[in-house]
Amino acid sequence: MAIPKVQELRKAVATEPNLFTGAIPRKDWQDTFTEFKEGNFAYPAKPEMVAYHKFPNSRVWSPDEDDWKLPDGWEDIILTGLKERLGKFRSLKLFMDICVRCGACADKCHFFLGTGDPKNMPVLRAELLRSVYRNEYSIGRKILGKMQGNRPMTVKVLKEWFMYSYQCTECRRCSVFCPTVSIPLKSP
Amino acid sequence: MKVLRPIIAVIALIVAGGVLGMSQGTQMLVGVILPSIAFLVLIVGIIRKVIDWSKSPVPFKIPTTCGQAKSLSFIKEDRFDCPTSKSDVIVRMFLEIFLFRSLFRNTSADVKSGDLPKLHYGPSLWLWLFGILFHYTFLTIVFRHLRLFTEPVLPGLALLEYLDGFVQIGAPVLYQSDLIFMGAITALFIRRLIMPQVRYISLGTDYFPLLLIFAIGATGMLMRHYFRVDITAIKQLTMGLVTLNWANPGNIHPVFFMHVTLVSTLMIYFPFSKLMHAVGIFFSPTRNMANDSRAKRHINPWNDPNIKPHSYAAYEDEFRQFMVDAEIPVDKELPSASAAETTEEVTA
């Protein structure tokens, strides 16, 4: 991507929905998947650094490769991790349940203003996780699955989490404007 | 279209309520049994959810700070945006819950065209306005309905009705709250459809409650102003619900049963949906905590004992060589070559 000029940026920043892909998304966000291109993702830590921090599954990998070399049963690891965190943080549990999707936070996020990528709206960034949460925990998921926009945990969803979690500085500006709660994104 | 399914669902509910409300036998089902169960689901559902939330601890102090914290005496403190005492937190919560203060702060980012398009931030109060109008008129309407569930009628209700019908249009009097309510809910619905950002994030479950509540308002107004339903018969039925002395006086218009079916659906839907924000807002740790972590120690109940504190001294011990190489100042110098020699001599 060529470096945009200030004039172009000024216009693009607030009028064009997606500077990254250069296109207005025509599909629902559930059907739009992340593209990893040189320069648009955070590099993973070196294996020795991961091991130094005693984090599991240290390996050489890159987000722009198709195979992320995930450990066996990674879906379970994530869902158990989510469950554990729901038990540890009232904030997480609450914010998964009560967001009204009013959109007040949307144009407050500097990542959204900067990139125009709709998934950088705080509400939608949290929705990436919330759709999986509802798929696991919502009582009406069997009947309302489609209407609630639920999604099972898949590699594509995980890749989305990776992309958009790192496009959050946890500045909590969204929380200032949120009528019900704040929604800082925590990635398992 | 994500809005299609909710529309079909609400129409189906209206039809079901109307059909079941037509014959004496099934009127009992939708007029008495359904609302009783729905009310039970509402209460039990809310309590269950509240208990579920309460089970998870709040490990960290995470109030959202929107202003200057309490500091030195000559620095002006922003008491309600960064509260340090419990009373300030209560004021903040009050402003939040009764005046929707966070939403009042809303700004919108847009582009002012000119020679150079310029990013512009300005206040945007429409969401706040329609939101607060909707919530307050809904509350007024719920209060007005208490007339049907109390005998003698609660004191103050007559005054409320008088004030609400102050402009005195039509007979029976048209309530202002009804009009504002219908207008506000329509505005909130249209907002979801026409604002591209909000439409993109909206799910079926966002449209459904709006449509449902709109249908509740519409059937309610039809009952009062068009069908002129038999209010004494309805009061007999509703008092039967409260006193558990179930009765169906008959001769009630089917539109009443549509209304009741929709309201029951709302009550059943409430505890399992985003509508729980009405209760959740009280639990929100970003708003109900005081920003006093420097004055009072906040204990994390599940603090992981395996995570040991890493002091600066230990950190420097670990990385001293790297720090010296990068010319970062260190507290303790590397053991120099000459110093190493002298210690050797001493030990020798």
Image (tube, rainbow, N blue to C red):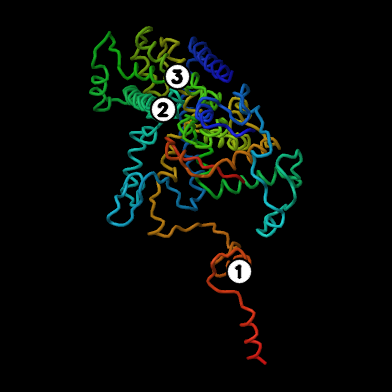
> Percent position (x, y) of residue B31?
46, 19
Q: What is the crowding at mark 2: few (fewer than 14 residues within 10 Å), some, or many (at least 20)?
A: few
Report, in whole angstroms, how far the alpha carbon at label 1 lies from the one at label 3.
74 Å
For residue B320, the mark is 1
**Mark 3 sits on what residue?**
B260
Residue type at tag 3:
Val
Q: Tell which subunit mark 3 falls on.
A: B
> Percent position (x, y) of residue B216?
43, 18
B16 vs A86, nearest the viewer? A86
Which image quarter: residue A38?
top right
In this rendering, would B79 be left or right of A26?
left
Which image quarter: residue B106?
top left
Mark 1 or 2: in front is 1
Residue type at tag 1:
Arg
Q: Tell which subunit mark 1 falls on.
A: B
**Mark 2 sits on what residue?**
B244
